[in-house]
Image (cartoon, rainbow, N blue to C red):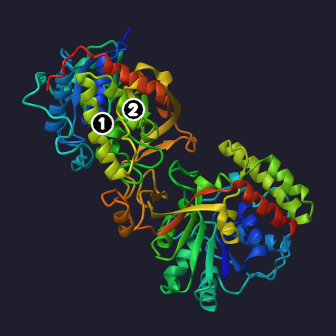
Amino acid sequence: MSQKIILDVDPGHDDAMAILLAAASPEIDLLAITTVAGNQTLPKTTLNARRVCSVAGITGVPVAAGCDRPLVREQRIAANIHGESGLDGPTFAGEPSVPLDPRHAVDLIIDTLMASDGDIMLVPVGPLTNIGMAMRREPRIVEKIKHISIMGGAWGFGNQTPSAEFNILVDPEAARIVFESGAPITMCGLELTHQAKATAAVVQRFADLKTPLGDFVVEMLTFFGSTYKKMHNFDGPPVHDPTAVAWVIDPTMVETQPAHVDIETHAEFSYGRTVVDLDDVMKLPKNTLVATKLDVDRFWDLMVGAIASYSATPAAR
Amino acid sequence: MKYLLDGDPGHDDMVAFLLAAKHLDVVGITSVHGNTPLVNSTRNALRVVEMGGLTNIPVARGRARPLVNAPVYAPEIHGVSGLDGMDLPEPTTRLHELDAVDFIIEMSHQHANDLWLVPTGPLTNVAAAFIKDTTLGERISGISLMGGSLTYGNSTPAAEFNIWADPEAADVVFRSGVPIKMFGLNVTRMANATKAELAHIREIGNPVAVTVGTLLEFYRSSLENVFGLTGASLHDPLAVAVFIKPELFTMKPMHVAIELHGTLTRGMTVCDYRYVGTDEKRQAEGLDAIEHGETPNAEVAVDMDVPGFFDLLYETLALY
């Protein structure tokens, strides 16, 4: 039985990798891709999601646009990392062939969950605006959600501020709704995702596939690597988002520790922080599986294998 | 160089005092609320100087309450006396006639530009001295403190006890502009005295070492019960040890902000780890576009030589 998921994204280079991994994996039944404002504005992230699907030949998976700004705060984007298009690096000619689903992402999420037998996982890898909004719009979805595998947060240092990771910082109020919802959560934060660095050796593995999609991935990772080098002096960009998909595919690939996690929404320096009680100081219910360690070799084998599985598909730019 | 120790003894404060007294020119000890109410921490400071034969060091009583919030204590860690584990005699030494805040200011005049403050409890006394005498920062060489953490706490998931106990005071200190050395939980929990280290301390054999080893065993068992730790974290002595053997520590310059307003993160030391050098250095290394964080206001301990620290501790206790 493959696991049904809805993938909520803001592509974004690593979001693109998450889409490609989820759509290729036999362990996953990708019900829908929903988009949100985050790494770039909503029109750009939505266009990018359609482009990635078109390039890879992912058809039959609805792509629906969601919320175009955080619940409360001013919008914040990451053009310094993902470029003006949100997916700088590869070039595209014209409109993508994959259409935009007419439904609003929040409606799609609610309707899909409510019609389900409680067997769907949500995999949000951008700001949690769509999921938080869906929970407020239809609280009954919480009991329908089998699990939420989130890319976001950090218990150590943040990336956008010293204490906050980008996805949570962008919409802390939405994140708080999700973490306080009671739905079971896996949190793939920076401590995990920074283990998934696309080093030169990793990029070479995609190049060695000598397939159109392999080349597309190399183009993405090359741009993503250049901005991570420039902005953070990283040797190899951390490919955050597919780790949340990898946990769904094979939870043994990711070590986790149960902990109470809540979101700081009122602070001066540390708003947007995932306050992770790994030491159980507060003796509160453990609402989250906090991802701590990635089996890096198996993760890249999985990722390379997924891209290789598209070998028959001509990349249609 | 002269040193003024400010603490809330507290088992690890005791070790800090004993370590400093044998190596550094200590001009005084000031007590503060914290691990235990002020009446206890003051009595314990006197007990420690008497136990160590250090009654030539003046002890001045400090502030009983934080600047703003209500006091919080840690009896679950240090016992109801603040120094549980052995009944030390009631002290007979008299306190200094000045209170801690005036004592700090007075010492800063007597030893202008030649004085480090070494606070190992909540920063109330030091902050109050800065507030009372706005020129204090011009006369002290710096502040070496135990407090805060890189990224996680022990009083809350975000805040370490000394900062949590008086965040506004910490804010005053970290904004003061004087050089700061910060020894937070990330490194102080490495100074982990397990049963083996405590046995070694008792085996040194002199009465002070036996007493210290016995008292620390109470502290070790508290930390095991409360936090599940394997040993006694000797937090406070690190802020002293850096002056005796600076090579024991790896320090990194960072900007440290104190979170005062968080619902969940109040008392957090928000450490901007992103600093990679001055504008000139970044330019020379081609890193001018990097996210480089705010200009550092502190040297933050990020790593330490644990065996080297314990050697120093054993050697020092053998001197008593």
As measured in the structure, the alpha-carbon distance from the residue carrying label 1 to the one carrying label 2 is 10 Å
Instruction: Give me the disc on residue B233.
Output: none
| Kind of residue indicated by mark 1 | Leu
**Residue A33, image quadrant:** top left
Chain to which the residue tagged by mark 1 belongs: A
What residue do we see at 63% from left, 64% from top? Answer: B34
Residue annotated with mark 1: A221
Q: Is residue A5 visible?
A: no
Q: Position of residue B298 (x, y in %)?
A: 50, 68
Toward the viewer: B121 or A219? Answer: A219
Q: Position of residue A250 (x, y in %)?
A: 45, 20
**Residue B107, image quadrant:** bottom right
In this rendering, would A249 be left or right of A16? right
The local crowd at label 2, few if under 14, some if 14 to 19, many if 20 or more residues have their Cα within 10 Å, is: many
In this rendering, would B213 be left or right of A143? right
Q: Secondary structure at mark 2?
A: helix
Q: Position of residue A160 (x, y in %)?
A: 34, 50
Q: Is residue B27 visible?
A: yes
Q: Secondary structure at mark 1?
A: helix
What residue do we see at 78% from left, 59% from top? Answer: B311
In this rendering, would B156 be left or right of B236? left
The local crowd at label 1, few if under 14, some if 14 to 19, many if 20 or more residues have their Cα within 10 Å, is: many
Answer with mark 1 or mark 2, whichever residue precedes in sequence.
2
**Residue B24, image quadrant:** bottom right
Residue annotated with mark 2: A202
What residue do we see at 32% from left, 42% from top? Answer: A225
Does A267 sit above or below residue A38?
below
Does B237 sit above or below residue A225?
below
**Tags 1 and 2 touching, CB below 8 Å:** yes
| Kind of residue indicated by mark 2 | Val
Q: Position of residue B58 (x, y in %)?
A: 74, 82
Does A193 sit above or below residue B70?
above
